[in-house]
Image: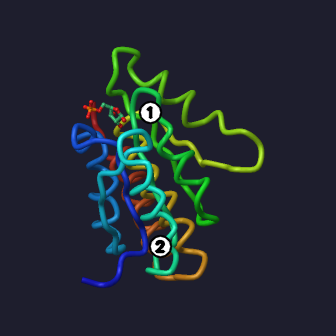
Amino acid sequence: MKSPKVAILMGSLSDADIMAPAAKTLNEFEVSHEVRILSAHRTPAETAAYVEEAEARGIEVIIAGAGYAAHLAGAVAAHTTLPVIGVPLDSSPLKGIDALYATVQMPGGIPVATMTIGKAGAKNAALFAIQILSRKEPELVERLKKYRSAMKEAILSIEL
Ligand code: RP5
């Protein structure tokens, strides 16, 4: 396995199903990645240590998904200048509205690129990471164009 370029972090094993489209999409684009369960609240020191070592290990983009008071993406962004993509997860009784606000409302100075709530957000986080990587990997630009073309054809071929 090539050294991972993208890290997919999530706050709990219970997030795995909602976050699954992120790894699936990176696999489709053959982008190397690793997945870790790390929590802003339950494993704060381990989360910081992982993030502080990530860039030296070759990680270029970090995706962080969490639900409830979702501080993971922000806590990750506090420890790195790598781009951090946050996915608010609909795992709580508030259906992700809580996680959306917690993830998107970063104070000025420490940005988190926040995606859609839930599985669509996990998929878009992977695509956004691929778009970032594609700036220096032209073959990813070609794969993104093919991906969009296939989406277009799938829609236009629908007969009702
Ligand atoms: C958050 O708390 C996690 O991201 C998860 O969405 C939520 C609940 O975690 P569990 O209590 O199911 O472990 O930190």
Q: Quadrant of ligand 1?
A: top left
The amino acid type found where label 2 is placed reads Glu
Q: Position of residue 139 (x, y in %)?
A: 46, 82
Q: Is residue 123 above or below residue 30?
A: above
Residue 134 picture location, percent across and down: 54, 74
The vertical placement of 106 against 140, above or below, is above
Horizontal side, residue 150 vs residue 81: left or right: left
How many neighbours does mark 1 have within 10 angstroms: few (below 14), some (14-19), or many (20 or more)? Answer: many
Q: Amino acid at mark 1?
A: Ile
Q: Is residue 156 visible?
A: no
Query: Residue 7's quadrant in the figure?
Result: bottom left
Q: Going by the image, does 2 lie left or right of 97?
A: left
How many numbered marks, from 0 up? 2
List the residue tagged with mark 1.
Answer: 117
The label number, if any, that marks residue 93 in the structure image: none
Question: Image quadrant for the C terminus?
Answer: top left
Rendered image quadrant of residue 34: bottom left
Judge left or right: residue 78 versus residue 117: right
Secondary element at tag 2: helix
- Is residue 157 or residue 38 the one in the foreground? 38
- Pointer 2 residue: 53
